[in-house]
Amino acid sequence: MRVIEVQSYSVSNLVNNAFASSWSDDNKMAVIHDKGVHILALTPNPHSVLASLSCSRYSIKTDSSFPCSDLGIDLKKLIWNLDKDDVYKLLLDTSLSPILPKTEPINPNVKQVAWSPIIHLKDQECLLSVLTDMGSLIIYRLMNMTWVNLTSISELWIDHCKKKWSSIDTLSLKEEMAELERRGSHAKITAMCWSCCVYNNSVLFFTATKAGEISFWRIGRALKIIKTNLLHSIQSDLQMIVKVHWFSIAENAGFLLVASLEGLLKCYTIQCGTNTSDFKIKDTYSIWSERDRLKVSYMDVWKCETGELLVFVKEAFVLVFLLESTGKPVCHAVHRCSDIKISSISRVNDNSILMTTCSGRVCILYINLIKNKLQLTSQQVDNNFNLSHMACYGASLSRNKVICGIVLSANQAFDHLILRDPSQIILGTLPEIVKPLSFLQTSNESLCTMWDFLEVLRVQTIQKTFVPEIESKRAVLDTLSVGKLTLLLWMISFKLAAEEDELKLSRLVRLCFYIPILILNK
């Protein structure tokens, strides 16, 4: 098995964190770097004559706001009256005192991005949520070729917290400092995730705070307006939550997986609804109870034949759990990679995942259940990436697993005499995983869900590695559905861009005029 590189893009900013990339259902790839988020959007063009994937590039700058800078307590007044230990504590905790006079300014960094499912079927677009290490959480949408700030979840959350704060007029200095810490831990958002299920053009959104409080939001779309409602919040028994993940098992129920900085991982089976009284924690199961201080950097759950598979990553370890329908773990298996750290995980199908490490090793990890025991086996995926002074910080697969986006960035110390190399986003294909043409011919889905397939076939047609078969018999064309006729029209456009024979070109042009008439008459 091999990754075949199609093209690459340079990004001037450095990428520093693993799991830096993620791919959306509307075929956009987001990459976290030290100045914000870089976005590649697949824009299929059937008439393009270039042997490269048609993409648009966008950038979102890191939000510079500090949600915890307004906690209702005057820091400038408080800091001059505290003892030395409390002053040091206040200065070291940037979430409590992000802005203080005569101190160096803090530059927030993007900590996590997450794509929503396609909420509104009419526009087939996903929303992007961006969380910084200062607790700023903003939801963006692409409008008129610009990523626009739709709403700030962190501001809405701060406004909600302020309603519960009591007066500090009667508090002593020690009590005021303790109240400041309490407010900061409840106000700072440290993790978030989307539900994958859409109901009535709305979707559930989840946030977690430093204090372990988990909030349920409902985010809906109506034309160009986004509606955000805080439904409920619960207090978990974990502190310093770093990762949350939701898996729907019914319309109003699901598994909420929560991981803490200490390395703990718990599964809550939650019943949810539209009213506060509808939210109930039905069961709680400890998935990983060892305080190993290995932070969970990735989580995903999906259905398999025997239950639900939970996959999560801790540094160099991949852990796979089989869960019952209630969320109770049945068995598990552990795979340790040969590198210091895993940099990405992407699900290929129900029984395999694509894994990369920081050193650039790419492999497929197969998950098998044999005699009620999980077994993990890996297969090397060859590549020709230049990793002499680069590291791999992420890889993600497109919606239909046909395009692989891999992020490389400099991994050496550079002084002022050496020109720093830009980061690289490599787009490639994995032909052994999925065959684009066979999938398109057998699928009944809308073509707008298969842009990645069409772009790969167009590039292969230009490169002469794929020759599309064009059906030209009128009797056969009359029997084809609208979807198949539309697909055939795309194939003809690919062929027109690559064809040099004038006789064949004239036949293809005649078909281009005839097929739209058939589509209109269906």
Image: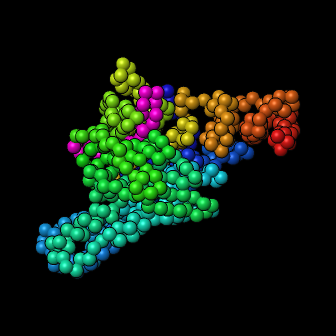
Q: Which residues are magenta?
A: 291-310
Q: Is residue 392 left or right of residue 426?
A: left
Q: Residue at x 49, y 65 (%)?
A: 151
Residue 429 vertical position relative to residue 226 in the rendered view, above or below:
above
The C terminus appears in which quarter of the rendering? top right
Asked if residue 309 is among those painted magenta in the image, a careful observer would answer yes
Q: Residue reaching furthest top?
A: 371
What number of labels is visible?
0
Q: Is residue 106 left or right of residue 205?
A: left
Q: Is residue 479 left or right of residue 274?
A: right
The quadrant in which residue 506 appears is: top right
The quadrant in which residue 481 appears is: top right
Residue 86 vertical position relative to residue 5 in the rendered view, above or below:
below
- The residue closer to the viewer here, 336 or 214, is 214
Is residue 62 visible from the viewing direction of this image? no
Q: Main secondary structure of the magenta part?
A: strand
Is residue 443 visible from the viewing direction of this image? yes
Asked if residue 247 is among those painted magenta in the image, a careful observer would answer no
